[in-house]
Image (cartoon, rainbow, N blue to C red):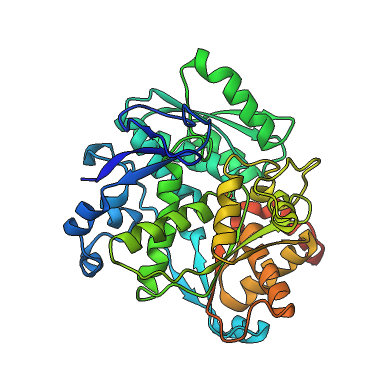
């Protein structure tokens, strides 16, 4: 099925054998990237063949890591709508505006893509159980795909994670541990326990395949826009896996002759209460320092330290993009604005991209003729407590 060759260290380029279950690279303790034989892949599939294929991310199976179809663990993830939102665009000064609505994925967020790929490959390579530190949505997705695969899942989440994520993990049969701390504390707990417990750690970018699932957003964007990428992509950034994945996807697509060399400017949008990538971008640093006392209502953006920070900063700079922070008040106001003007009920993280867009239009960094895509990475329905605190006052 696939054309996976090996795994490459993102720091030094050393090859790692594809048939082993890897976490970080053996040489540099850095994320590993899957490498494919793109020449062979491009002979096996032409972009013109795609319309006849299934409407999930698995339409790009030649550039996904799973080798045996029986191991594919799918709930129908990907190939989400790319919706033109012209009225909202005109109001904010960018008429050619789109929202990629990831809220319609299984489990209600784009985390489904990464976990579908990672659990599929973990099944293929013989993992007995997986463990994950999560801000919420990745935990829910892990629980769902592990249930689908018949595998045990051990999920560690901050105790103040939205209740929808907690409930779904439990109902889906995962073992859930609520932690009095942040996602980074959850990550430490997984790392301490995994060897003795026999868990495979699927923390983002600490295993090589979640990014492969997330990269399919980049394939879809190109396909849905007739193989011409937009001018600007706005991405709500925590661990940054989607941003890094799309950047990888476009290089693969260029190597296969599917697109040219023009790339969008990538904008990482973070919350003011947790903006390590923005700070590193602004100071010209190549890596990001840990953000103390991280706090934001957009729980997926509460990632004070990310293992792939240098990859994010590299992609942002290579694309001539930028990184900006928005306040919780601004992103919450944008939930209502996006929802009421487009019909898409966004996660706070997705709404943050609209708040960021307004800032960049105001600064003149985005021009009125630019084609811009906002990533709504999840559904607002998972954040009911955060969004409805004022609503009961209306009862009569
Ligand atoms: C809805 C939502 N948006 C954005 C993010 C951040 O994603 P990434 O880690 O790929 O930057 C998350 C992560 O939990 C999320 O749940």
The residue at 70%/80% (across/down) is 364
The residue at 40%/61% (across/down) is 250
Measured as percent of width and height from the top left, residue 246 is found at 46, 57
Extreme top residue here? Answer: 196
Does the rendering let one see residue 109?
Answer: no
Measured as percent of width and height from the top left, residue 52 is found at 21, 66
Measured as percent of width and height from the top left, residue 337 is found at 68, 74
Residue 391 position by quadrant = bottom right
Residue 232 vs residue 275: left or right?
A: left
Which quarter of the rendering shows the N terminus? top left
The residue at 51%/40% (across/down) is 11
Q: Answer above or below: position of 11 versus 321.
A: above
The residue at 75%/49% (across/down) is 274
Residue 304 position by quadrant = top right
Does the rendering let one see residue 192?
Answer: yes
Q: Answer above or below: position of 54 versus 30.
A: below
Which quarter of the rendering shows the C terminus? bottom right
Measured as percent of width and height from the top left, residue 365 is found at 67, 76
Extreme left residue here? Answer: 43
Looking at the picture, tell me which residue is in the foreground, 16 or 178: 16
Residue 270 vs residue 133: left or right?
A: right
Q: Answer above or below: position of 233 versus 28.
A: below
Total labels: the figure holds: 0
Looking at the picture, tell me which residue is in the foreground, 96 or 168: 96
């Amino acid at each position: 099925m696939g054309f996976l060759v090996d795994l490459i260290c993102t720091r030094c380029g050393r090859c790692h054998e594809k048939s082993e279950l890897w976490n970080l690279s053996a040489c540099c303790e850095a994320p590993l990237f899957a490498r494919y034989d793109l020449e062979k892949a491009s002979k096996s599939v032409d972009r013109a063949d795609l319309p006849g294929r299934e409407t999930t991310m698995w339409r790009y199976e030649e550039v996904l890591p799973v080798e045996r179809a029986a191991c594919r663990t799918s709930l129908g993830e990907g190939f989400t709508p790319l919706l033109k939102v012209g009225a909202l665009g005109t109001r904010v000064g960018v008429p050619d505006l789109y929202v990629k609505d990831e809220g319609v994925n299984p489990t209600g967020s784009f985390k489904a893509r990464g976990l579908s790929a990672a659990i599929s490959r973990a099944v293929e390579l013989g993992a007995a159980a997986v463990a994950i530190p999560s801000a919420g949505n990745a935990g829910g997705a892990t629980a769902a795909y592990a249930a689908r695969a018949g595998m045990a899942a051990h999920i560690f989440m901050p105790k103040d994670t939205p209740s929808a994520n907690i409930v779904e993990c439990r109902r889906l049969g995962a073992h859930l541990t609520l932690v009095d701390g942040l996602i980074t504390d959850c990550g430490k707990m997984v790392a301490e326990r995994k060897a003795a417990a026999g868990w495979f750690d699927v923390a983002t970018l600490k295993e090589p395949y979640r990014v492969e699932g997330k990269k399919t957003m980049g394939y879809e964007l190109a396909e849905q826009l007739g193989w011409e990428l937009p001018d600007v992509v706005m991405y709500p950034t925590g661990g940054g896996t989607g941003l890094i994945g799309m950047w990888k996807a476009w290089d693969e697509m260029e190597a296969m002759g599917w697109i040219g060399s023009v790339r969008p400017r990538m904008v990482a949008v973070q919350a003011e209460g947790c903006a390590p990538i923005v700070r590193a971008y602004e100071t010209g640093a190549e890596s990001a320092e840990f953000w103390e006392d991280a706090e934001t209502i957009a729980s997926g953006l509460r990632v004070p330290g990310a293992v792939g920070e240098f990859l994010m900063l590299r992609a942002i700079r290579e694309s001539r993009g930028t990184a900006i922070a928005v306040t919780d008040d601004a992103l919450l106001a944008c939930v209502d604005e996006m929802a009421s003007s487009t019909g898409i009920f966004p996660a706070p993280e997705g709404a943050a991209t609209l708040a960021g867009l307004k800032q960049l239009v105001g600064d003149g960094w985005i021009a009125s003729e630019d084609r811009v895509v906002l990533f709504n990475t999840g559904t607002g329905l998972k954040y009911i407590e955060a969004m409805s605190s004022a609503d009961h006052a209306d009862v009569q």
